[in-house]
Image (cartoon, helix red, strand yellow):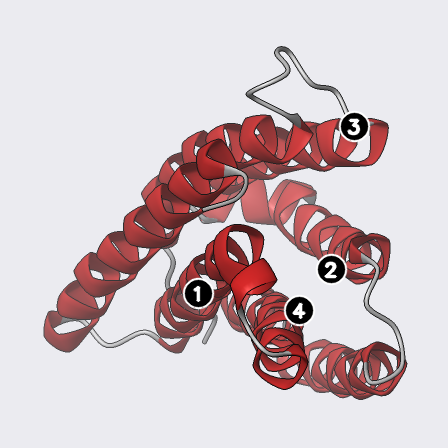
Amino acid sequence: MTEPATVLTDYLLGAVLLVLAWRALRLDRRDPQAARRLWAWGFVALGLSALAGGTWHGFSGRMEAGPAAAVWKGTVYLVGLADLLMLSGSASAALGRRARAWLLAAAAAKFVGYAIVMATHDEYRYVVYDYVPSMAAILLIHAVPGSLRNDPGARSILAGLALSFVAALVQLARLAPHPHFNHNDLYHVIQIAASCVLYRGVIRLHDRR
């Protein structure tokens, strides 16, 4: 296994996200809300991407070129899908019908553009370039005064997003606290904390009527 710390932290992140998604979907069966359900499936996509990313970091050197490339492409496409689902969930919770329709159309177009770009690129920075605007849009949706007053999950989502931005900065700046614990590992640990904080907000989301 290469990069064992990255593999372990990636797998741990994936496991945490899948458990949080499972708990949110269980809650949704008792109290169906599209906003919560979309976020939960976003957690599923993000968790699967973490598991695929950990597999690539740890074992791609032992794979044939084709399977290794497929694992990496699966990783980056799942992140893009997670962005789309989470943004759609926030739009369902906080926006009116017309604004939601416009935002969802723009988000879908962004995802298609991202998929086209990633068909010919492999650098993780493109993932971050797609991820940050989606998180910024979610931040704006939940930061408006009406959302803060009326949406009990808004503050937790904003706090989780702040941690996610810190994780993204760590990733881009390549901050490595130890030779055996690099910027990817630190990113995963911060993102685990961010996911738990986001979950506290997600389970409180309700669809805007």
Q: Nearer the viewer, mark 3 or mark 1?
A: 3
Q: Is residue 7 left or right of residue 139?
A: left
**Disc 1 marks which amino acid?**
Trp
Q: Secondary structure at mark 2?
A: helix
- Seen at 27% across and 53% down, the residue is 20
Q: Earlier in the sequence, mark 2 or mark 3?
A: 2
**Disc 2 marks which amino acid?**
Ser
Q: Earlier in the sequence, mark 2 or mark 4?
A: 4
- Seen at 57% across and 26% down, the residue is 186
Q: Is residue 19 left or right of residue 174?
A: left
- What residue does disc 2 label? 134
Q: Earlier in the sequence, mark 1 or mark 4?
A: 1
From the top left corner, tell me how far across and down residue 204 is, in percent.
32, 51
In the rendering, which numbered label is found on residue 76?
4
**Disc 4 marks which amino acid?**
Val
Alpha carbon of mark 3 to alpha carbon of mark 4: how far?
19 Å
Number of residues whose C-alpha sits closer than 10 Å to that of mark 2, classed few (under 14), some (14–19) or many (20 or more): many
Asked if one can make out residue 198 in the rendered structure from this viewpoint, the answer is no
Asked if marks 2 and 1 touch (Cβ < 8 Å), the reply is no
From the top left corner, tell me how far across and down residue 128 is, in percent.
78, 52
- What residue does disc 1 label? 39
List the single residue furthest toward the top.
177
**Disc 3 marks which amino acid?**
Arg
